[in-house]
Amino acid sequence: MKNLTILLIITSGLLLAACGDDDSGADVEATPETTEAPTAGAEPTPEPDDETASASTSAADDPSVSSVTVIAEVWADNWFSLTVNGDFIGEDSVPITTERSFNAETFTFETTLPMTIAIEAKDFKETDSGIEYIGERNQQMGDGGIIAQFTDAATGDVLAVTNSSWSILSVHQAPLDKSCEQAADPDTACEWLIIDPPTGWETIDFDSSAWTSATEWSEADVSPKDGYDEISWTPSAALIWGTDLEIDNTVLLRTVVG
């Protein structure tokens, strides 16, 4: 009887130990971590590299340009030099030292639009006094004038003409006092003003906003001849110069087309 009692106690202990092991296992069971699933169909957004960003910026900043073949027709009293987009195109074939040189010139060239047209124009003068034919019966002040038109060679469309929309800067003015016109020695009696052309004035990036507007002059004012009638001028093309045909001896002209 005593032995049976001991056996029952041992059996009960084993049963309690087995139940305790089950509860302990439940308590330490690990809970798996959850992660957010990606949205169906979504793709990661790539970071832009420096080269792509730079190319996009450059493309946005670049202006639209187009190539064109241009025919330039120019008549001047007495001489001119033509530059387009900073490139020298040509000049009057008759030197400025030639008296009574009235002739027209035609140039054909390739360029891009928009284009910056720059012209240096000079009236003949014997000395810096601005007087012509010194010591002769016809001693006088000279007078200038220029007209030009630029045509698209492929279409015949007129791209630009000289008019008051052009910017102008007079870099040689003489005589400042017209009363010296008949002086026996104009170089002593007359005064003049000469300034150096601004650096880069014929280039695309030059700022000519401080310049004045060119003055339009009539055919009666300029009396164009010898070559002027050889060109079929579009009605909108005008003879232009500074504010004084006689005092302004050398002028710089600019305009932007397109």
Image: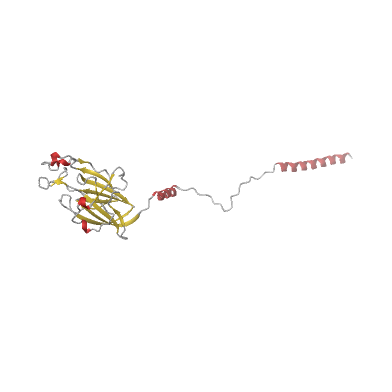
State left or right for residue 40 relative to residue 4: left
Q: Nearer the viewer, residue 177 or 121?
A: 177
**Residue 204 rendering spot, x and y as whole percentages:** 31, 48
Q: Nearer the viewer, residue 45 or 197?
A: 197
Residue 243 falls in image quadrant: top left
**Residue 166 rendering spot, x and y as whole percentages:** 29, 48
Residue 19 falls in image quadrant: top right
Q: Nearer the viewer, residue 212 or 59?
A: 212
**Residue 136 rendering spot, x and y as whole percentages:** 10, 47
State left or right for residue 15 relative to residue 125: right
Q: Nearer the viewer, residue 123 or 246?
A: 246
State left or right for residue 128 relative to residue 235: left
Instruction: Count all numbered tags in the image, as a single digit.
Output: 0
* Residue furthest to the right: 1
Residue at x 32% of width, y 57% of height: 68
State left or right for residue 216 relative to residue 32: left
Q: Quadrant of the N terminus?
A: top right
**Residue 100 rendering spot, x and y as whole percentages:** 15, 52
Rendering colour mode:
secondary structure
* Residue furthest to the front: 220
